[in-house]
Amino acid sequence: MNSRTIRSFAFRVDGKQSLSACLAIASVRLSCVFGLASCLTLLAGGCQKTPKGMADHTEISGTVRFNGAPLTGGRITFKAGEGDPGSSAVIDPNGRYKISAPVGDVNISIDNSMLNPAAHKGKERIQKGAGPRPGGFDPEEVKGAYVPIPQKYADPKTSGLTYTVKKGDKEHDIDLTDK
């Protein structure tokens, strides 16, 4: 029922609307205002919480070194566990990375095989990976020079690289060896 309907049922006394009709119109308008305010409050409150099943994230940066020297390019991934697609970032030619990592225990992988020219001989060189996730951004291009590192580092299950990410962490350097 809207205010026009209520007005049409209003009793008129000497050409004026009765008090009960005015109160009915005012209550409909107030209901609309409170309903709209409630919806906006729910929407704003929902924006501040992490969706169920999604981990909080924090920005971490650092340097990846291989045998003491900065790794000259590649991709780093922090993976929180099974079912987690992981957070990934580019390692620049100076070995630096910056990633939005999930808070908690993570397994880390380092991969620079996309920079290996021998692996892409006769094929178009692919440096971006599989492309964006649905609704995601196009991945940043990996730049740098290929340095052969042990294959174990490319998989978070075999890399042996683990870390506990805490809210507010800022730096985490990673040292790889050929052993």
Image: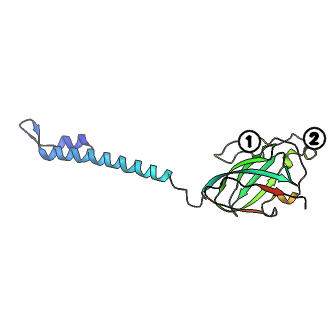
**Is 54 situated above or below 28?**
below
Q: Residue at x 89, y 48 (%)?
A: 147
Instruction: Identify the residue at horizontal 65%, vertical 45% (top origin).
Output: 136
Return the x and y of residue 114 as percentages of the image width and height: 84, 46
Reading the image, the residue beneath label 2 is 122
- The quarter of the picture where the C terminus appears is bottom right
Q: Judge by depth and name the residue closer to the eye, 21 or 162.
A: 162
- Quadrant for residue 127, please give it: top right
Label placed on residue 13: none
Q: Position of residue 13 (x, y in %)?
A: 7, 40
Q: Could you tell me which residue is drawn at 80 percent across and 64 percent down? A: 160
Per the image, label 2 sits on a secondary structure element best described as loop
Image x and y of residue 70, in percent = 83, 48
Q: Quadrant of residue 77?
A: bottom right
Q: Give yes or no for contact between labels 2 and 1 (Cβ–Cβ under 8 Å).
A: no
- What percent of the width, then of the height, locates residue 66? 86, 53
Residue ID for mark 1: 140
